[in-house]
Amino acid sequence: MKIALIGIGKIARDQHVPAIANSADWNLAATVSRTGTVDDVPAYTNIDTMLAENPEIRAVSLCLPPVPRFAYAKAALLAGRHVMLEKPPGATLAEVHALAALAQTQGSTLFTTWHSRMAQGVAQAKALLAGKSVIKGHITWKEDVRRWHPGQDWVFAAGGMGVFDPGINALSILTEILPAPVHLQDARLDVPENCQTPIAAQLTFSNGITADFDWRQEGPQNWDMWIETAENRVELSEGGSKINVDGRDITGEAAGASLLGEYPALYARMADLVRTGASDIDLSPMVHVADAMTLGKRVSLPAFHL
Ligand code: NAP
């Protein structure tokens, strides 16, 4: 199946282009980006032109930052194409609900991807926690924004989500593996005085679950979480790629462990969705972020520069 990539920037080059190149399901047939291109792939700067000139391209994958993404997704759905959205799926919840309704009307697939859910240990953690009662848990998601987002000013502009841009990956894992939903009860948001979005956040959820997100972590980076039930302590580390139960590393041991990388698994899932005429739309990680922005107490910090 032919697919077009929209927004040729960091994640398109790092992950989407290689995942499509190695996919048995997809051929990269066009790109749409104001300046970015991919070698040997027809490049457009206008999505309407690309859609009009390439009726055989049935799907588009949107790798833009969240704020400009909606207009491109709407144009593709209105043109009868299937749409795959990078995380977070939009700048607001309501615009993703609007895309979901449009996809249904058009009979198109809409896939709100959460790449961290495809990390190797996540399915195992979900299976281990199924049917259990969660007593407590903690997420530590601390990375260096200057290392991972050099020059990307949009992360600190309104709609860029700040530290929730990586933090939502942790929340996508949490919402996938927990046996029952939790809800946010308290939040602290640390916002540099020259930024619209937080650089750090501490969250408290029901069921004794807490989270610590920080974008100022130099040296070793932490993408870890643990969940305790009466029976076990399940730990996911390195972004969900490693799993440990009661002190024993069980990574890859159980059925359900992903054998594909995160992005190849997303493209395989998109192919299944298109073939079966289904959509996969889950906003639960973004609901927690929206709740934190609504409920959180803001603490103003000195200016921060990327
Ligand atoms: P990026 O490199 O800053 O932006 C991607 C491309 O989008 C840019 O190169 C730009 O291409 C286009 N773009 C930017 N602003 C635009 C605007 N206002 N209107 C139209 N096009 C615009 O961002 P990224 O790091 O790839 O992240 C994109 C998405 O992927 C985000 O939602 C992010 O959360 C997600 N993601 C990123 C990473 C990562 O490691 N960076 C990892 C996983 C997921 P042109 O200038 O050529 O138009």
Image (spheres, rainbow, N blue to C red):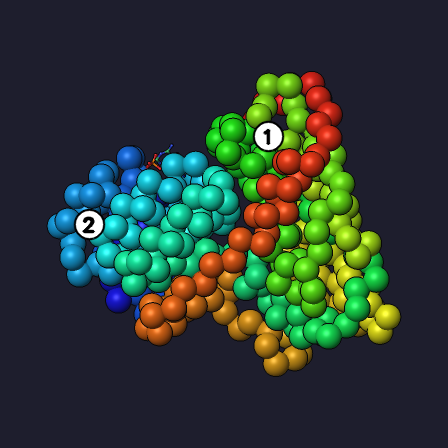
Count neighbours of disc 1 (C-alpha within 10 A) and say few if under 14, some if 14 to 19, many if 20 or more. many
Is residue 246 visible in the rendered image? The answer is no
The residue where tag 1 is placed is 197
Decide if residue 220 is on the left or right side of residue 263. Answer: right
Mark sitting on residue 121: none
| Residue 248 falls in image quadrant | bottom right
| Residue 244 falls in image quadrant | bottom right
Residue closer to the observer: 184 or 123: 184
Decide if residue 118 is on the left or right side of residue 184. Answer: left
Q: Is residue 161 above or below residue 233?
A: above
Q: Quadrant of the C terminus?
A: top right
- The residue depicted at 51 percent of the width and 28 percent of the height is 157
Q: Is the CB atom of the residue marked by disc 2 within 8 angstroms of ligand 1's nearest atom?
A: no
Name the element at disc 1: loop
Amino acid under disc 1? Thr
Q: Is the CB atom of the residue marked by disc 1 within 8 angstroms of ligand 1's nearest atom?
A: no
Decide if residue 26 is on the left or right side of residue 263. Answer: left
Image x and y of residue 232, in percent? 82, 71
Mark sitting on residue 51: 2
Is residue 149 visible in the rendered image? The answer is yes
Image x and y of residue 255, in percent? 61, 81
- The residue depicted at 57 percent of the width and 42 percent of the height is 165
Q: Is residue 228 above or below residue 100?
A: below
Image x and y of residue 188, in percent? 74, 34
* Cα–Cα span, label 2 and label 1: 34 Å
Furthest residue toward left: 53
- The residue depicted at 57 percent of the width and 48 percent of the height is 286
Amino acid under disc 2? Leu
Q: Sequence-wise, which precedes: disc 2 or disc 1? A: 2
